[in-house]
Amino acid sequence: MLVVMNANATEAEIAGVVRVTEALGLRAHTMPGATRTAIGITGNKGAISLQHFENLPGVAEAIRVSKPYKLITLDLKQDRTIVDIGGSKIGNGSLAMIAGPCA
């Protein structure tokens, strides 16, 4: 599940969503963005009721995410990850050829 906070949500409101998440036995992954904060929720074995989160102060919307790999999907984080290794960038759209010993 993804909980998107209002642009003017306070730290206390964000902490409130995290508290409710943890009280349900789930894990909250706070992801601050340029204009608003999103909170990815993982650890559920089945569907979570959106109503646990939709009416909390500061929440803009709660969205079900039924795709696998919730922590790496672009649904949660719109910016691409670019890793800089010794001046070589991986993930910026150019081809990266990586080789090493296979023994």
Image: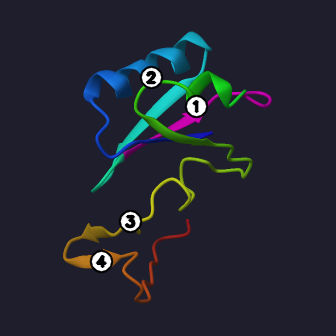
Does residue 84 lie above or below 62 as drawn? below
Residue that numbered label 2 is attached to: 18
Q: Earlier in the sequence, mark 4 or mark 1?
A: 1
**Residues drawn in magenta:** 37-48
Residue that numbered label 4 is attached to: 89
* Quadrant of the image occupied by residue 24: top right
**Residue at screen point 55% across, 65% down:** 103
- Is 57 included in the stretch rendered in magenta? no
Q: Earlier in the sequence, mark 2 or mark 1?
A: 2
Residue 45: x %, y % from top left:
77, 27
Label 1 crowd bin: few (<14), some (14–19), many (20+), radius 10 Å: some
Disc 2 residue type (three-letter)? Val
Q: Earlier in the sequence, mark 3 or mark 1?
A: 1
Disc 3 residue type (three-letter)? Thr
Residue found at the far bottom of this picture: 94
Element on which disc 4 rests: strand
Residue 73: x %, y % from top left:
57, 58
Element on which disc 2 rests: helix
Q: CA distance from mark 3 to mark 2?
A: 25 Å
Element on which disc 3 rests: loop
* 81 or 50, nearer to the observer: 50
Q: CA distance from mark 4 to mark 2?
A: 34 Å
Which disc is residue 81 wearing?
3
Q: Is residue 24 left or right of residue 87?
A: right
Q: How many marks can you see?
A: 4
Disc 4 residue type (three-letter)? Lys
Residue that numbered label 1 is attached to: 54
Residue 80: x %, y % from top left:
41, 69
Q: Are marks 4 and 1 in contact (CB under 8 Å)?
A: no
